[in-house]
Amino acid sequence: MKSNKLLFINKLGVSCLTILCTIQLSAQDLKPAQPNPANQPIKTTQISVLAQNLAKIGAFSCAERANQISNFLSDGQSEVILQLPKDNPNNRLLMTSLIIKGARDSDILASISLAPNQINGCGGSYRTIFHSPSTCNKASSTLFSKEKFQNIGKSRAQIAVINKSMWIIAMPINAGCLFIKEEIIE
């Protein structure tokens, strides 16, 4: 029987679903996350909880890229869920999710994929998903004022293509708008 290893990493350490382990982090890792709903770069030189824990499990080849993405999306101190490869984590595709504290009691989900041994060292992509209680038109004009959203076919969803590797999708839902921002890190 196969068993998937899934880590729930929080600011206090690591809990494993199918294996027993604990990784304690220092007191400096206990700073609360700062909201960053529009995913604007945050100026920081700290090592993120995600990067620290990738290094601790032996996934060194993507720890720097993980730190770059994690610090871009938040202050690096998000709640982390890390999918563990069954062996050789330094040479396997890594998948993780961050739960980032957002504004007005609304968290942001960030899903990150990291691929070692790429031309650029470690390739990566991320997807952030967050909700706005406003309509898509109102929220997109406030959060992404410089971007031009266009309809996606006959659906009610709209897309703003920032460049060939980044786009934002706005999807109307019953109570507001669901935003999905995706980027491939080159």
Image (cartoon, rainbow, N blue to C red):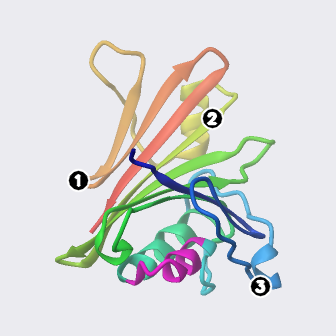
> Of the residues tagged 2 and 3, which is closer to the observer?
3
Q: Main secondary structure of the magenta part?
A: helix
Q: Are marks 2 and 3 in contact (CB under 8 Å)?
A: no
Query: Is residue 51 in the magenta section?
Result: yes
- Which residue is the site of mark 1? 164
Q: Which one is in front in this view, the residue at disc 1 or the one at disc 3? A: 3
**To which residue does mark 3 refer?**
26
Give, as a single range, the part of the protein colored magenta. Answer: 50-60
**Is residue 24 positioned above or below 1 on the image?**
below
**Looking at this view, is 52 or 34 the one in front?**
52
Kind of residue at disc 3? Ser
| Mark pair 2, 3: CA separation | 32 Å
Q: In the rendered image, which quarter is residue 137 located in? A: top right
Element at label 2: strand
Mark 1: few, some, or many residues within 10 Å (few <14, many ≥20)?
few
What's the amino acid at mark 1?
Answer: Lys
Quadrant assignment for the N terminus: top left
Residue 110 in the image: x percent, y percent? 53, 52
Sequence-first disc among 1 and 3: 3
Q: Which mark is residue 131?
A: 2
Q: Residue 179: x percent and y percent?
A: 52, 37
Instruction: Using residue 39 as the reference point, say whether residue 3 is left or right of it.
Output: left
